[in-house]
Image (cartoon, helix red, strand yellow):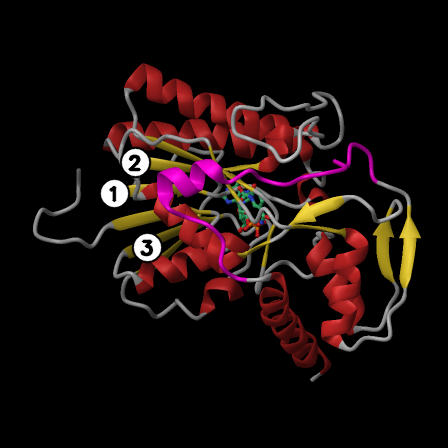
Amino acid sequence: MRQAMYSLRKRVMVTGGAGFLGSHLCDRLLADGHEVLCVDNLFTGTKQNVEHLRDHPHFEFLRHDVTFPLYVEVDEIYNLACPASPIHYQHDPVQTTKTSVHGAINMLGLAKRLGCKILQASTSEVYGDPSINPQTEDYWGNVNPIGIRSCYDEGKRCAETLFFDYHRQHQLPIKVARIFNTYGPRMHPADGRVVSNFIMQALQDEPITIYGDGSQTRSFCYVDDLISGLIALMDSPEGVTGPVNLGNPVDFTMVELAQKVIELTGSASTLANADLPADDPKQRKPNIGRARDLLGWEPKVPLEEGLKMTIGHFRGMLDAQRG
Ligand SMILES: NC(=O)c1ccc[n+]([C@@H]2O[C@H](COP(=O)([O-])OP(=O)(O)OC[C@H]3O[C@@H](n4cnc5c(N)ncnc54)[C@H](O)[C@@H]3O)[C@@H](O)[C@H]2O)c1
C-alpha cells in the first residue's frame, strides 16, 4: 500500500469524477481530508462540475478515457466512469459497452498492480425488468441481451463478473455497489432522466412528459445519501464485497412525482402522455436490508427536501442562462 503509515490521508482516484455522482464524491472525499485524482473524459461530465475544486491543494483533474490503460499511484479507486442516462449511453452504444468492460479491465488491472481496493458503481439496471419487487441482491435479473438498453445493462453485468473474477482469481479487494435512481444538484439538465426532465419542464411551464400511463414506480435517492453509502461500502471490512443495493426503498409512481414537482415549483405545467420507451422496467425498488446490516446505512433525506435542493440548482442554472 502506498498510504503512509503515519497519515490517514489517502490518495483516492474517482473515475467519472466530473459527472453528477463523481463530483459529489470528490467533494466529500476532499472534505474528509483525502487527496483526490479525478479522472474523466468529459463525455457527459463537465469541468464546471469540479470548477470549485480547481484550486484545492489536494485536488487533481486528469482528462483520460478509461477504455485505455492508466498508470498512476493511488490508494483506492472508485470506478464511476460510464454514461448513465439512456440518451447518453445509447448515443454510442459500442463505446458504452467498452467503457464498462474495457474500463473495468483497465481499472482492475491498475488496482491489481497497486494492491488497492476498488469499488464499482454498478446499477439496478443489472436486474433488468425485474420479476420480483423489491429487488434483493441474490435476484439474477431479467435482462434483454440484444435490446437498446443492453449496452449499458450487459456492460455493467459483465463489469460485475470481472470484479468478482479478479477477487476470486487474484484476491483483489473489491466492493460492488448496485446504485438505484439517484437525483440531486449537478444532474445533467437534458439527460432525459425523470427527475431532471420533470423539474426542467415544470420550471419552464412546459407539459410534463409521462411515459405510458404513469403508473410505473421508481424510488429516488438523494445524492448526499448515496455518497454516504458508497463511502461506507468502501470503508467496510475486507470480507464485504457486495453486491450491495444502495437506493431509497420508498417508491412513487411517475404521476405522483410529477404532481410533487409541480407543487414544489409552483408551476403551471400540465401532464402529457407519451409512449413507453422499449424495455422500460415497470417497477424498480431496492431491498436495502444488506446495506442496513453490513454498513449500517440507509437514506435520510426525504423526497420533498431533496427535490427542493435540486429545484434550487436547476432554477439557478436557468436564471444564469437567461442572464
Ligand atoms: N445517477 C444514477 O441514478 C445512477 C444509477 C445507477 C448507476 N449509476 C452509475 O454511477 C456512475 C455515475 O453516474 P452519474 O449519474 O454520475 O452519470 P454521469 O454521466 O453524470 O457521470 C459519468 C461520468 O463518467 C464519464 N465518462 C464516461 N465515459 C468515460 C470514459 N470512457 N472514460 C472516462 N470517463 C468517462 C463522464 O464524462 C461523466 O463525467 C455511472 O457508472 C452510472 O452507471 C448512476
Which of the 4 image quadrants contains residue 200?
A: bottom right
The answer to whether the residues at label 3 and label 2 have Cβ atoms under 8 Å apart is no
Residue located beneath label 3 in the image: 36
Residue density around tag 3, few if under 14, some if 14–19, many if 20 or more, within 10 Å:
many
The residues tagged by marks 3 and 1 sit, at their Cα atoms, a distance apart of 10 Å
Q: Which residues are magenta?
A: 277-301
Residue 274 at x, y percent in the picture: 91, 49
Looking at the rendered structure, the secondary structure element under dot 1 is: loop
Q: Where is residue 51? Give x, y as percent.
A: 46, 68
Q: Position of residue 293 (x, y in %)?
A: 39, 39
Neighbourhood count class around disc 1 (C-alpha, 10 Å): few under 14, some 14–19, many 20 upward: many
Q: Residues within 10 Å of mark 2 (few under 14, many from 20)?
A: many
Q: Earlier in the sequence, mark 3 or mark 2?
A: 3
Q: Pointer 1: what residue?
A: 75
Query: The residue under label 2 is which amino acid type?
Result: Lys
Residue 190 drawn at (x, y percent): 72, 58
Label 3, label 2: how many angstroms apart (C-alpha)? 15 Å
The mark closer to the camera, 3 or 2, is: 2
Q: Quadrant of residue 198?
A: bottom right
Check if mark 1's residue and mark 2's residue have beta carbons within 8 Å.
Answer: yes
Q: Secondary structure at mark 3?
A: strand
Callout count: 3
Above or below, comparing residue 76 to residue 110 in the picture: below
Callout 2 secondary element? strand
Q: Is residue 280 magenta?
A: yes
Magenta run includes residue 19 = no
- Identify residue for label 2: 117
